[in-house]
Amino acid sequence: MLTPIPGTRNIRQLFVPNREVSAAMGAKVLERFPAGAPRGSWPAEEYAARRRAEGEPATVVMDLKSDAFLVVVPAGDDD
């Protein structure tokens, strides 16, 4: 139901259950990061930023069931 808007930091838009990611967003998961990173560390956001710098429309969502952040791209984009 909630889908992230690339480039936004609205916390409500970051929470999408993993099984809904591909159905709701038509997205491909590139990488998973545990939510328990040290304070001030944003490994999923940093990874997504590197992918965006390479030209991929990567965004970060959260899988609440597995307590992990997922870096996703639209499913139609190939490597």
Image (cartoon, rainbow, N blue to C red):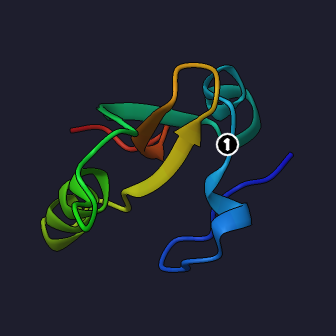
Residue shown at 51% from the left, 29% from the top = 67
Q: Does residue 62 sit above or below 32 in this rendering?
A: below
Residue named by callout 1: 25
Location of residue 40 by image quarter: bottom left
Q: Nearer the viewer, residue 39 or 47?
A: 39
Could you tell whether 39 is left or right of 35 in the image? Answer: left
In the rendered image, the quadrant that contains the C terminus is top left
Q: Secondary structure at mark 1?
A: helix
Give the amino acid at mark 1: Met
Residue shown at 69% from the left, 41% from the top = 16
Could you tell whether 33 is left or right of 14 in the image? Answer: left
Location of residue 23 by image quarter: top right
Q: Position of residue 44 (x, y in %)?
A: 29, 51
Residue shown at 55% from the left, 80% from the top = 8
Q: Position of residue 53 (x, y in %)?
A: 15, 72
Location of residue 54 by image quarter: bottom left
Q: Nearer the viewer, residue 54 or 39?
A: 39
Residue shown at 36% from the left, 57% from the top = 58
Q: Position of residue 74 (x, y in %)?
A: 50, 46
